[in-house]
Image (cartoon, grey):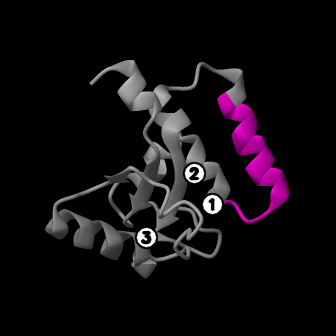
Amino acid sequence: ITIDNITNRTIYYVHTGKTGGTTLGFVLRAICDWYRLRRPKEECFKKFHQFNESRLSMITKTHHHTSMTKTNHEWLPKSTSFLFSLRNPIDRAVSAFDMEHPMNTNITDKAIQL
């Protein structure tokens, strides 16, 4: 793959919950669009302008969280490629259970020390 081939691509990132997608948010600028409020969205974009942004981040045009956001009908037909985060289904189920289990959080959303 040449640099020209990469630059001409438009990637649509599909984030499935509990698959490491939030971590990708630290390296993909498209995650910034996920923020609904203007201030957090602007702060997110500023972080990418302060550092050398990766080519992957530059060509990833939108972010879709399968359980939280609607399909971006503007970028879906324009996309040349799709990026998915995947995880072992058993590990994913255990992670989701652990995250939602009442013994793991309290009113302030902090982990309970056992």
The residue most toward the right is 39
Q: Nearer the viewer, mark 3 or mark 2?
A: 2
Instruction: Residue type at mark 1: give it.
Output: Trp
Q: Where does label 2 land, which residue?
A: 31
- Residues in magenta? 34-48
Q: Residues within 10 Å of mark 3 (few under 14, many from 20)?
A: some
Image position of 31 with respect to 26: above or below: below
Image position of 33 with respect to 70: above or below: above
Q: Nearer the viewer, mark 1 or mark 3?
A: 1
Q: Is residue 5 left or right of residue 29?
A: left
* Distance CA(mark 1)–CA(mark 2): 5 Å
> What element does badge 1 sit on?
helix
Q: Is residue 63 left or right of residue 89?
A: right
Instruction: Residue type at mark 2: give it.
Output: Ile
Residue at the (71%, 40%) spot, across then down: 45
Residue at the (42%, 77%) spot, across then down: 100
Q: Residues within 10 Å of mark 2 (few under 14, many from 20)?
A: many
Image position of 69 with respect to 49: above or below: below
> What element does badge 2 sit on?
helix
Residue 49's spot in the image, x, y percent? 71, 27
Instruction: Residue type at mark 3: give it.
Output: Asn
Instruction: Give the position of the N terminus as an image quadrant.
Output: top left
Q: Where does label 1 land, which residue?
A: 34
**What is the number of the mark on residue 104?**
3
Residue at the (75%, 34%) spot, across then down: 46
Characterize the magenta stretch by its predominant secondary structure: helix
